[in-house]
Amino acid sequence: MTLSALLPTAPLPFLLLPLALPWGLPPLARRVAERVRPDIALWTVTSAAAALALGVLACLGALLLPPALALPPLAHLAELVRPLKTGPRALVLGAAAPAAGALAVTAAVAVRRALAEVRRFRAAHEDLAGLPHAGGLCVVDDPRADAYALPGTRRRADRIVVTTGMLRALSAPEREALLAHERAHLAGRHHLFLAVGRLAGWCHPALGGVVRQVSYAAERAADEAAARAAGDRSLTARAVGRAALAATGGRTDRPAFAPGAAGGPVPARVRALMGRAPTRRMAPALLVMALLCGVAGGSAATGLALLHRDVEIAQGDVAEL
């Protein structure tokens, strides 16, 4: 039995469904970030956002294909021997027009913001180029309180950046807890999760709401690592709270994917540190989130397969049903 016999349905509904499903992720991501062990929550929430973003981009691109292949030069290039039929013309064009606009806006926003982040990243490393460092720690003479983990490049090592204003705001044990927190960010490569979360957020408005949950999970993972290193959860909670209060009005020129001292909802982080270390690996919201991604992926794959079948029919390779 051929694929075309197994898939006799029009592709349009299957390509539209993955564009709506991302709206279900933000509340699920919030529950996962609150109830699941932070490192697991960070991986799952970021992966779900990335998977849904890829599905959105694939479906938007697929929606543009039918009207594009209606143009004689492209139809000839695709070796179509008959018009491509994917559904009512008005419906196909009605879906393709907003898809083209969404792709154009997404591309423009992604390029503009990505270039801005690259400029900030390079500027941050250039500012540190002439400063002494000990074990990757750079102390910047700045009265504004700030601390963040700056990932490295092939030619430049990772750096933990702390201002003199932040050092003055904390006691010696709190400084050690803060530095352990920033080391955990670098060891866990949390900047990659934050970058992927932001890229996904630029692809769909609903996924923009997940960036906060990715940031919260990354901060909570670093908080727990710092608490283990310090051997005192209350000390770590105090360091997090005081650092966040001191950092109010601090530096804002660092890259957004460089985790900072006041990242994520600080009151929630402090409350979590005042309780027991989280050990839960699974939650109903995590299972629902996996189901959401599975439905979106299955729908996108089905829509693309149906569209491929219609192209083969238009090429004369498969008999029309």
Image: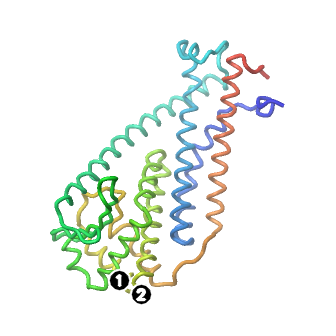
Q: Quadrant of the C terminus?
A: top right
Q: Nearer the viewer, residue 236 or 14?
A: 236
Question: In the rendered image, which residue does mark 1 sit on?
Answer: 238
Which residue type carries mark 2? Answer: Asp
- Residue 260 appears at what percent x and percent y? 33, 66
Query: Answer yes or no: do the residues labelled 2 and 1 have beta carbons within 8 Å?
Result: no
Q: Residue at x 33, y 54 (%)?
A: 153
- As drawn, the label of residue 113 is none
Q: Nearer the viewer, residue 247 or 186?
A: 186
Relative placement, left or right, of 10 versus 78 is right
Q: Residue at x 78, y 19 (%)?
A: 319
- Residue 173 appears at what percent x and percent y? 31, 85
Relative placement, left or right, of 33 versus 302 is left
Dot 1, how many residues are within 10 Å of its Cα: few (below 14), some (14-19), or many (20+)? Answer: some
Q: Is residue 76 above or below residue 66?
A: above
Tell me how many marks there are.
2
- Residue 101 appears at what percent x and percent y? 46, 33
Dot 2, how many residues are within 10 Å of its Cα: few (below 14), some (14-19), or many (20+)? Answer: some
- Residue 317 appears at what percent x and percent y? 73, 19
Circle 1: element type = helix
Q: Residue at x 42, y 72 (%)?
A: 222
Question: In the rendered image, which residue does mark 2 sit on?
Answer: 232
Q: Quadrant of residue 105?
A: top left
Q: Quadrant of the N terminus?
A: top right
